[in-house]
Image: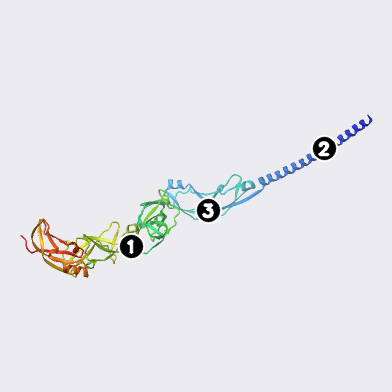
Amino acid sequence: MLFNKKQKDKDKNASTNTNRKNKKGLATVDIIMLIFSLMLAVALWIYVYDTTNTLDEKTFNLVSIEKKNTASLFENHNLVVQYVNIDTVNVTVMGSKNIIESLGSNDINAYINLGNITDAGEYKLEVMIDLPEGVTCKSQTVPYVEVTVDSSTEKNIKVTGDNVILSGWSLEEGYSFGEITTNLTDVKLEGALNDINKISSVGLVTGDLGSVRNSMTSICQLVLLDSNGNRLNLPNVYVTPNINMSDIMAHITVYQEKRVPLVLSYTYGYIDESCVSISPSYVTIKGEAASLENINSIVIGNIDEGVIPYPVYEVELAIGYDGVQIFDDNGNALNSAKVKIDRSSLPSRIVTGAALYRNGVFSGYAEVLLVARHNDDSCKMFLSSISAENIRVYAQSGTDGYAVELSDNYFEYLYQCGVTPMVGP
C-alpha cells in the first residue's frame, strides 16, 4: 500500500508539470500571432495611406481635340470648320496613386467649343481638358488652337470612266485598255466655300492592277483634284450622302490585238488560191481576250465558182465579226475588202460538140469552156484528154444558165466556166 501511494503522488506531479508546459506553449503562439497581426495591419495601413494620399502623375500623348458644337454652327449660321492648325494635344495629369494607375486614354477628353462663333473668320480657341473626379491637369502642350471658319456650300461633280486613275499596271505586248466604266455616276461634295472652290474634279484611283491580260473590276478610292489634276488634302470636305468607299467600282475593259489573214469561203472549194488576191490580205483585230482566243482568220464572204465570170472576177465584200474591231495596217477601221479572182493564167480549152439537153430532151450541141483547177501536170493532162463525149450540158429551166456534167474522173481537175449553144430548136 505504501508503494502504491508513492506511485500515485509521482504520477500526479508529472501531470501537473505537463499542463504547465502546454499552457506556456500556447501563450507563446498567441504572442507570435498577435505580433504577426500587428505587422500585417501596419503594412496594410501603410499601403492604403500610400495609395490614397501619395500623389502620382501620368502623361497621355496625342489626345484628339474634339470640335464641339459643329452641328449648331452649321444649323444656326451655315458655317463649317475649314482649318484647325493642330488636332492633338499631350496632357500630363496628377492625382492619387490608385486613381492615376487606373486611368486610360479614354478618360482624358480634350475639346474646343465652337458654340460662340457666329461669323466666318479666324479664331483662337482655348483647348479645354475634361478629367475624372480627383484628377487635375498638371500641363498640356497645346493651350490654344487656331481655327478658320467659312461658309458652307455644296458642289455636284459628274463621274465617268475618264475620272478613273489606273495604278500599278503593265500591259503585255498585244494588249490595250478599252472602255472604262464605273458604278458611281456623280458625287455631291460639302464643305467650306474656300475648299470647295479649289476642287475641279474627283478621281477614282484603282488598286494595283499588276500585269494586265483580261478585263477586270477594281475597288476604287475617291480623291479630290484641282484644275491641274493634282490631289488635294481637304479633310473637312465630305461626300454627301456618305459613300462606302468599298462600294466604288470601276470596270476596266482590256483588249487584245491580233493580226490575222482575210480568207474566202467557196461553194465547191476548187478555186486555186494562187488566183485569188484580197486587199488588204491581213488585218488587225481588237477585242476582249476571250473573244479573240479562237479567231485565227476572218472569213469575208462566200464565192460560188459556178457563177463567177471568167477570166477575171472583182468584188468588194463586207467585213464584220461580232464583238471585234477590225483595222488596217495604218490603224484605220475597216468594214470591207476588195477581192480579185484572176484565172486567166490557168490552162483552159474550148470543147465543141457537147450534147445539150432542154427539159430532159436532147436539143442540139454546145461548146464548153473548161479551165483547169490548178496549174499542174495532172490538171493539164485531164484538160487535154477530155472529149465532147465526156460532157453533157443541161439548160436550166427558167434561166439563161447551164449546168455541165463531167465524167466523175474529171471533176476534181476541171470546172466549167462558160457554155455557148451551137445548135438549138
Choose top left, top right, bottom left or bottom right for residue 216. Answer: bottom left
- Of helix, strand and loop, which one carries label 2? helix
Question: Depth check: 105 or 40 in front?
Answer: 40
Residue 252 is situated, as x and y percent measured from the top left of the image, at: 37, 56
Neighbourhood count class around disc 2 (C-alpha, 10 Å): few under 14, some 14–19, many 20 upward = few
Residue 166 is situated, as x and y percent measured from the top left of the image, at: 39, 59
CA gap between label 3 and label 2 equals 73 Å
- Of helix, strand and loop, which one carries label 1? strand
- Provide the residue designation for mark 1: 257
CA gap between label 1 and label 2 equals 110 Å
Badge nearest the viewer, 3 or 2: 2
- Provide the residue designation for mark 2: 22
- Of helix, strand and loop, which one carries label 3? strand
Badge nearest the viewer, 1 or 3: 1
- Check disc 1 and give the amino acid type: Glu
- Provide the residue designation for mark 3: 88
> Farthest residue in the left direction?
425
- Check disc 2 and give the amino acid type: Asn
Badge nearest the viewer, 1 or 2: 1
